[in-house]
Amino acid sequence: MKQIVTIVPVLLLALWGCNSYDTQTNSLELVKGEIQSVVNGEVKTMWRKGEVRFFNLEGGFYGLIADNGDKLLPMNLNKKYKQHGAIIQFQGHYIKDMMTIQQWGQVYKITKVQLIKAGRSTSQPTH
C-alpha cells in the first residue's frame, strides 16, 4: 500500500509532463540566440528595449542594459546610437564563444535598432 501511495504522484507527474504542446499558446523562446515569441503558431523575433551606457573601463566601451536587467555588449552598435543614457528598441542575437577585453555582459549582435530617447553624445559622461 505504501508503494502505491508513492507511485501514484510520480505517474501523475509523468503524464502531466507528456502533455502535447498547444500551438495556440503564447510563449517566449531563445532560438539561435534570438528571443522569439510564438503567438498562435507564428514565430516573431522580439523587440527589446534598453539603455545605452558608456563605461570608462578598458579604454571605454558602450554597453546595453536591457529592461529585464541583462547586460549586453553590442558588437555593432551604430555610431549614431552611441549616446550615454539613450533609450533604444532593438532586435538581435547573442554571440557565443567570443571573448572580449571588456569582460562585461553577454556579447550581442544587433540586427535592428530604433532610437526612442536621445542621450548624451559624449564618450565620457561625468559622474
Image (tube, grey):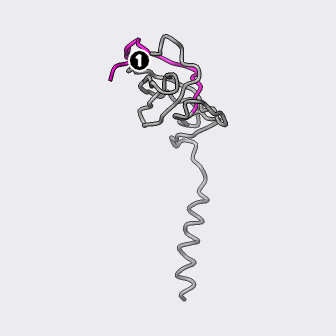
Rendering coords of residue 91 (x, y %):
54, 25
- Of 103 and 59, nearer the camera is 59
Going 41% across and 32% down the picture, which residue do you hit?
A: 67
Which residues make up the magenta segment? 107-127
Rendering coords of residue 117 (x, y %):
37, 16
Going 41% across and 25% down the picture, which residue do you hit?
A: 51
Going 34% across and 19% down the picture, which residue do you hit?
A: 126
- Of 127 and 75, nearer the camera is 127
Vertical position of residue 9 compared to residue 71: above or below: below
Vertical position of residue 63 compared to residue 96: above or below: above
- Of 59 and 30, nearer the camera is 59
For the N terminus, give its image quadrant.
bottom right
Specify whether 111 is left or right of 122.
Answer: right
Vertical position of residue 100 compared to residue 120: above or below: below
Name which quarter of the figure residue 12 lies in.
Answer: bottom right
Mark 1 residue element: loop
Name which quarter of the figure residue 75 lies in.
Answer: top right
- Of 52 and 29, nearer the camera is 52
Going 52% across and 82% down the picture, which residue do you hit?
A: 5
Name which quarter of the figure residue 15 lies in.
Answer: bottom right
Q: Which residue is mark 1?
A: 124
